[in-house]
Amino acid sequence: MSNEIKTINLRCKKIITLSAVFALGTIAFAQNSAYQDINQYPKATKTNEQHIINLPAIVGNDSQNKKVEIYVGKYMETDGCNQYNLNGKLDKKTVKSYLDYYNFTTNGNVASTNMGCLNAKPENKFVSSQPLLLDYNSNLPIVIYTPKGYSVQYKIFTADNTTYQAQTVNNF
């Protein structure tokens, strides 16, 4: 291999290395800046846990087409046939007049359908309370407090920009 090709390879390796260092530094800064607001929220207590959702940043107005659905629950043994629902509620609270967080309360009771299932096998499933639908906002974290032992899961929904026309019916 000629000296010229070795020099080019060495320069490429340096550029790739510097790019990787820059990218990792940018990611670390972005994560740190997202977590700076966490200190303004109440601290978790001995009986509850703080869960934090940092949504991916969005360029432009695409966040108008997105929603976040939050589920609070826990994994438990089910009969593998019936539908289960955790009794609980997410209450919205505010800190410093603009930072919202959510407090989940539950008595731990679970309701289920009561179908007779002959060949169903027991399953370990995530049993949650009714979900909470929120507007997508990647500028602030979503902070949720639950009793110890409960988990928080979420889905991100995206709508397309297509608008549909409803059919008009004249019944006269």
Image: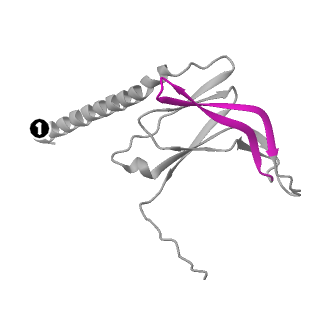
Q: Is 47 in front, or is 12?
A: 47
Q: Which residue, given by chain and number where applicable, does mark 1 sit on? A: 3
Q: Residue at x 43, y 40 (%)?
A: 56
Q: Is 136 in front, or is 55?
A: 136
Q: Is residue 74 visible?
A: no
Q: Is 117 in front, or is 73?
A: 73
- Residue 129 drawn at (x, y percent): 70, 41
Q: Is residue 32 magenta?
A: no
Quadrant containing the C terminus is bottom right
Q: Residue at x 44, y 33 (%)?
A: 140
Please state the total of marks drawn on the protein image.
1
Q: Amino acid at mark 1?
A: Asn
Q: Residue at x 32, y 28 (%)?
A: 25
Q: Is residue 132 above or below residue 101?
A: below
* Residue 3 falls in image quadrant: top left
* Residue 9 falls in image quadrant: top left
Numbered range of the magenta stretch? 82-111
Q: Is residue 169 above or below residue 84?
A: below
